[in-house]
Amino acid sequence: MGKSSKDKRDAYYRLAKEQGWRARSAFKLLQLDEEFDLFNGVTRVVDLCAAPGSWSQVLSRVLIKGEKFGRSAWEDQEGKLRQQLLKVFGQEISAEEKEAIDKKAREKDILRPRKDVKIVAIDLQPMSPLEGIITLRADITHPATVPLLLRALDPTYDPETHSQQASQPVDLVISDGAPDVTGLHDLDIYVQSQLLFAALNLAMCVLKPGGKFVAKIFRGRNVDLLFAQLKIFFERVIVAKPRSSRASSVEAFIVCLNFSPPEGFKASLDEPMGIGDRLSQMAKMKAQQQPIVAPTVLQDLATETWSASPAKPFRADKNGIIQLPPIENIDRAAKDGRWVAPFLACGDLSGFDADASYHLPKDRITLDPVQPPTAPPYKRALEMRKAAGGAYGKTTSK
Ligand code: SAM
């Protein structure tokens, strides 16, 4: 498939090149920020599984350069929109309100770089440098990566003694990790969950109380168990599906807000999350102490969010009326230590559909990718094929 047909098939792929993003994933992070105001008050961030680096680019443009995207940009435009709307209905706004709106509009494009920003990006693949971002080439599932990260965050960290002079924890950990997909759903979901546990483990070691954690998940069987486990450590856990993530894909993002681990909890490298049954025991304990499942399901209904869990404890009927789950399902879920996280679609719903093909004008110029892959897995295969004389090998003529 050529670049041009991919342009047609995927509006976000095309937009990413037009706007200078290294990958279309940038829109996913921007749309998550639009919904959850992720970057509010944030200066220290860890970007896991970061290559080719479009999420790091977003971080760099928002935190280092001080550009406005997402919610903060919308807030600036709100006044102007209100002004236009009132005009349509033949109404005027007061002189003071007009002055305030004009002032905001004048300030809209002023860059506001944040102070003391620290961004560390990690990936298995090499990543082309981005100004102001520390990049590490490492495997997030490997225990040796934790001290590497701690050292990058704080150069006084001594891996021998695990001591730090200054503890400067992190406000936000994001992870867009994805294994090479095999197409075998259960295997892909298993490997993805290992990446997620590794990301969570790293997050536990560096997040400050009140910090945020955002990670890619594949919605599969037992995902509600995972939600319950995350709920042990974060006050709010929400599953979000940005508009730029294809509806046909099982991909979604878990947004965990207000890191508040149980009293006395210490992240441990010796007993990482996801290994053994420490996590499930903590989840069960929490469910017994605080029966989070039933009240939260009802509460979520009240706020008009609904479950995306494959367990489908409740769903809308053909008239759009939400059916409550049979009460025994809620009871069973509570006993199993499962929990259904609220589900939110985010991003402008009238924006581009990630699953649609769009008509493009004939005279359109197809742009090259902003950052070609530095070491793509197919590079060696191509070299071998070239050395062998092409796709069908060397042909010798007699
Ligand atoms: N967020 C990135 C961006 O915006 O450019 C895109 C990330 S891409 C979808 C997934 C990345 O996960 C790949 O670059 C891959 O190398 C990385 N990855 C997969 N397993 C990893 C691991 N164990 N440790 C570090 N990175 C990993």
Image: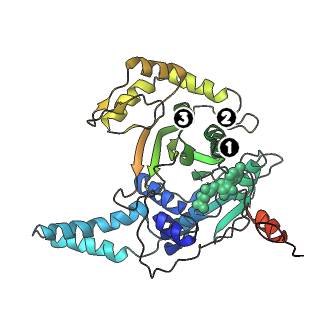
| Three-letter amino acid code at the position of disc 2 | Gly
Amino acid identity at mark 3? Val
How is the model colour-coded? rainbow
Give the residue number, with chain letter if any, for mark 1. Answer: 198
| Residue 100, image x, y percentages | 26, 71
Per the image, the residue denoted by label 3 is 223
Disc 2 crowd rating (10 Å Cα; few below 14, some 14-19, many 20+) is some
Which of the two labelled residues, at mark 2 and mark 1, occupies the earlier sequence position?
1
Disc 2 + disc 3, Cβ < 8 Å: no
Coordinates of residue 97 in the picture (x, y in percent)? 21, 69
- Mark 3, mark 1: which one is toward the viewer? 3
Quadrant hosting residue 143? top right
Q: CA distance from mark 2 to mark 3?
A: 13 Å
In this view, the residue in front, 291 or 154, is: 291
Residue at the location (48% across, 19% down)?
A: 332
Q: Mark 3 or mark 1: name the one nearer the start of the chain.
A: 1
Which image quadrant: the C terminus? bottom right
Image quadrant holding the N terminus, namely: bottom right
